[in-house]
Image: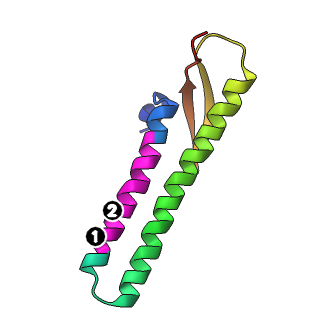
Amino acid sequence: MNAIWATTDIETIKTLALGVSGAAIVIGLIMMKVVSSIIGRVISLVIFVAIALAGYSQRAQLTDCANAVKNTTTSASSLTTTCTFFGKDITVKIPQPSK
């Protein structure tokens, strides 16, 4: 699993976080149809909205991490940095824009 995280780039991880958010919303909507009691619906909705927000906030943190590195570098080569994704430190390759 560490090898997978070590070779991912920032766009892949941002897409993954967005996918987690979207999947949580879709599952939450499906659960609203399946669960019949109002209390169960409310609890399910709160849980899946929390998962969606967590995924989106992680995406924003990764973007901020990548932007901070891009702003401080002057090298034309690819950089690597360590960011936190759901509490796990991962090494992310950040490609530099073409000049």
Percent across and percent down for residue 54 are: 53, 58
Among all residues in the image, which is located at the extreme front? Answer: 99
Q: Amino acid at mark 1?
A: Ile
Relative horizontal placement of residue 78, taking residue 19 as reference (left or right): right
Q: Amino acid at mark 2?
A: Val
Label 1 neighbour load within 10 Å: few <14, some 14-19, many 20+: few
Q: Name the residue tied to disc 2.
A: 26
Relative horizontal placement of residue 96, taking residue 11 as reference (left or right): right
In front here: 71 or 13? 71
Relative horizontal placement of residue 31, taking residue 76 as reference (left or right): left
Q: Quadrant of residue 3?
A: top left
Q: Is residue 3 magenta?
A: no
Pick the quarter of the image with the N terminus.
top left
Cα–Cα span, label 2 and label 1: 6 Å
Q: Are marks 2 and 1 in contact (CB under 8 Å)?
A: yes
Q: Is residue 73 above or below residue 64?
A: above
Is residue 2 visible in the rendered image? The answer is: no
Q: Secondary structure at mark 2?
A: helix
Q: Quadrant of residue 71?
A: top right
Among all residues in the image, which is located at the extreme right? Answer: 72
Q: Which residues are magenta?
A: 15-31
